[in-house]
Amino acid sequence: MDSRIPVVLILIAIILISGCVQGPSGGQPPGGMETDNKYGFLPPKTCPDGTASENGRAIAIVNGSKKYVTKEDGDWIGQNCNQGTIGMNGGLGTPPAADESNFSHGYGFFPSNICPEKLVPENNLLLGMINGTKRFIRWEDEKWIKANCDQKLWDMGRAENQEKSTEETGLDFLPQCGTDNAFFSNIPVSLTDVTGIVPLGNFNPSGHTFPTDHVYFYLRKPNPGDYSSAPVQTALSSPGNAWVIAISVSEHASENPPYTDYGIDISPCKDVKIRFGHVTSLSQKLKDAIVPPYSEYSEYSTGGKNYKMYRKILNVSVNAGESIGTAGGRAGQNALDVGTYDNRVNLSFANPARWQQGESQHTACPLDYFTPDTKSKMEAMLGDYYGTVHRTIQPICGEFAQDVPATAQSAWFVKGTTNTYPEDLHLTLAHDNVDPKKGEFSVGTSIKGISTGVYSFSPTNTGFVNRDFKGITSDGKVYCYEPGNQFSGSSSFTIILQLTSENTLRIEKKDSGSCGSGPWVFGSGYADFER
């Protein structure tokens, strides 16, 4: 969720009033259309540092200079740029008064992909200094700063902040992990309330265009014939003797009825954490621990709804089987997410630099951290969410990292993009997490004519039709696929693709229902991706 909709509407309204028109050159209006052009126009497809209005006209701020914004470029900015910069007065100033409710912290947002001069924790917020001015650092930008900027910034921030604001500091009190991974002995929810455990690597684009880094404990529905009904509410307990090291809170105040969603991180030792997502309530012990100051905090509005998100770093000991909350009981949240991250695990990717933000490169199977008897009970339920189809191919818990370097099998990113997340724009060519014999296109929003979704096929090891992705190299050949929709089982189009180099891919939808014998030629509707 973000503030895109209301702010972009304001920006477009300003543009419409000003009457700016995009010209043939892409950066200038046609002759006679604009007589007062003292600032010039923003270059096409450029994210500004900020936007404002002046004399009823849309203004972009780029490197401290003002530029006019055409309607087309305003639309592009609204779809592609960091929403913290849109609607801000002078790029680094506070938002216009009409939008102040969306930015209750009052500092304005820190620009994306820029290293701050200094980090300053203040009023339960993490602020960054730029040109001597404080700006609020959002969670996604904090991850970028951690991955790309001088580590000394964090050291200085810790020195000024009594609240330990990073996971690394929060783990200092924990014991070493040693060599035994059987830290947990208690299954966190009753398996009688679980219909199936979905393995790692599930696809659910556009939000999960890449393989998921967690498993799903799908919960039983009292009315199984009504998929939209709420699942049973079940008790959630600690998997072992460990420490709750962090709780994330997401308050959905405008929903009817309002609700709060929780995430709980539990660590038995320094390098390992298990994370429970979509927790519907907390035990009183944990609820009492969530008090200011917070390591992260934000409030925002979008679509007429209000949201509040915050995170508390903790040091709360829990015993195996001790109540920590509940899962289920809410329509639309059908599963408990369970992820495990082990800093001793370093997964292999075709382009490791894409996966340095966050913890995904340390993804592990949660079941591998349980004692043998509890692990075997859960492994028997790995498969689809109905519990009718089981995964039988190793690794039985699924795979998050499926990249095969120098082949088409990979997570793919829209050409020219730098951020790994959000996933919506991108693409994955890999295998199904329940039946790995199936090849799958997990399609985001960037392939013309193909709705976001999962499209499956039966791979072949030879030829040019339905070739297994890991068998395709940059051989100059074009390959064709006849995929079926994940749910309907059929589709009326084909897909052609080519690995144009070891790290670039071209792909296009074709309206023909079958591939024929080829050859296949790209038209004008292709999309280019890179690792």
Image (tube, rainbow, N blue to C red):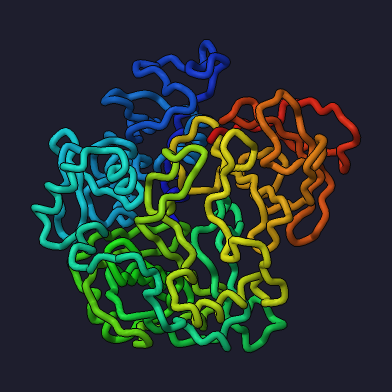
The image shows residue 350 at horizontal and vertical percentages of 52, 39
Seen in the image, is 453 located left or right of residue 424? right
Q: What residue appears at the point 57 percent right and 15 percent down from the top-left corner? A: 24
Q: What residue appears at the point 39 percent right and 69 percent down from the top-left corner? A: 181
Q: Quadrant of residue 480?
A: top right
Seen in the image, is 137 located left or right of residue 525? left
Image mark count = 0
Classify 131 as above or below 181: above
Residue at the far top: name it: 31
Seen in the image, is 471 located left or right of residue 243? right
Q: Name the residue nearer the viewer: 28 or 411.
A: 411
Q: What residue appears at the point 25 percent right and 36 percent down from the top-left corner? A: 115
Q: Is residue 2 visible?
A: no
The image shows residue 420 at horizontal and vertical percentages of 46, 43
Residue at the far right: name it: 516
Question: The N terminus is located in which quarter?
Answer: bottom left
Q: Quadrant of residue 320?
A: bottom left
The image shows residue 379 at horizontal and vertical percentages of 58, 74
Classify 325 as above or below 80: below
Q: Is residue 387 visible?
A: yes
Q: Name the residue nearer the viewer: 140 or 470.
A: 470
Q: Quadrant of residue 125?
A: bottom left
The image shows residue 324 at horizontal and vertical percentages of 35, 83
Q: What residue appears at the point 34 percent right and 65 percent down from the top-left corner? A: 179
Q: Name the residue nearer the viewer: 111 or 389.
A: 389
Residue at the far front: name it: 179
Classify 13 as above or below 256: above
Seen in the image, is 282 located left or right of residue 479? left
Q: Name the residue nearer the viewer: 253 or 400.
A: 400
